[in-house]
Image (tube, rainbow, N blue to C red):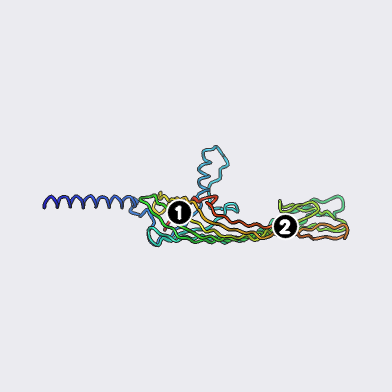
Amino acid sequence: MKTKLLFTAVAVLFLTIGMQAQQTQLMSKKGVPILPETGDYMIGIDASPFFSYFGNMFNGNTANPSPSFGFTATTPLSIYGKYMTNENTAYRGIFRIGYTNAKDKAYIIEDGQSAPIDPEKTVEDFHKINQFHITLGAGLEKRRGKGRLQGLYGGQLLFFMNTNKHSYKYGNDYSTTNTNPSRTNFGMNNPGGTAWTTSDKTGTNFGFGLQAFVGAEYFFAPKMSISGEFYYGLSYSKTGDGKVISEAWDPTANNVKESTSITGGASFFGFDTAVTGALNFNFYF
């Protein structure tokens, strides 16, 4: 009987030590839980700018800008987050609604001046940009693992749509005495020369994706982690026809002639791994 009691006591002692060791592994020195808990929310950001910065620190590049949250059109910011329904399950969401209304202004010498030409007598040319973008997504995430390293898997549905339009207005107009007015070429959307674009609108682009994902998340501090994911699934996108309106002087009619050209749209459907994955910093609270 004493032997059984001794073995029982030793077993309870080792079990208690093991449970305490497991708890210590998942708690900080200040007693703060390291892993997310039921009811926690998460906000994530793209980690790519930070890794680019740290990598460039060792390449001798003196013009190495520091990382920031200033995302651009080539690296658009989508807000994404999670809600932990329990320690191993989370709802995921992705959200972005963006609208841009930008205007460039340039000064150019006014045509039709009598000699000597005054370079300070100018007119204004304008380039206006209107853009709209929406991205919405929702999914379910499951996780498993021990300690700071957690495996992730699940599925999500994504929807996106965007539009893009460029408009131009020029200070020097066409006339019978000025069939080739001086104007500002604001970039590749404007051909210049004797024909000038007044409107360039790309077709509306929209699509959706149904993806399965798998990845890993490592908690380097309490409720702070870095994660990487890969995606596999189907995707569909469609771009409508675009329209370009330009104006030029018509010597036959002796007036300004406006012409319209249509740019062809496109569509895509595929079932494959995604071209890129995701590498993120995550903050739970």
Q: Which residue is mark 1?
A: 282
Q: Is residue 9 above or below residue 134?
A: above
Q: Which mark is residue 151?
A: none
* Residue 185 shows up from this direction: yes
Query: In the rendered view of the protein, which quadrant contains the C terminus?
Result: bottom left
Left or right: residue 86 versus residue 206 is left
Q: Which residue is mark 2?
A: 126
Left or right: residue 111 versus residue 53 is right
The residues bearing labels 2 and 1 have C-alpha atoms spaced at a distance of 42 Å
Residue 96 lies, in percent from the top left, at 55, 60
Residues 167 and 16: in front is 16
Left or right: residue 184 versus residue 32 is right
The type of residue carrying mark 1 is: Asn
Residue drawn at x 43%, y 51% as measured from the top left? 217
Residue 20 lies, in percent from the top left, at 27, 52
Q: Is residue 3 above or below residue 137?
A: above
Residue drawn at x 51%, y 47% as measured from the top left? 50
Label 1: few (<14), some (14–19) or many (≥20) C-alpha neighbours in 10 Å: many
Q: Are marks 2 and 1 in contact (CB under 8 Å)?
A: no
Query: Nearer the viewer's eye, disc 2 or disc 1?
Result: 1
Q: Secondary structure at mark 1?
A: strand
Residue 192 lies, in percent from the top left, at 77, 52
Determine the residue located farthest toward the left in the rendered image. 1
Label 2: few (<14), some (14–19) or many (≥20) C-alpha neighbours in 10 Å: some
Residue 241 lies, in percent from the top left, at 68, 60
Q: Earlier in the sequence, mark 2 or mark 1?
A: 2
* Residue 100 shows up from this direction: no
Q: How many marks?
A: 2
Q: Secondary structure at mark 2?
A: strand
Residues 249 and 104: in front is 249
Left or right: residue 52 versus residue 170 is left
The type of residue carrying mark 2 is: Phe
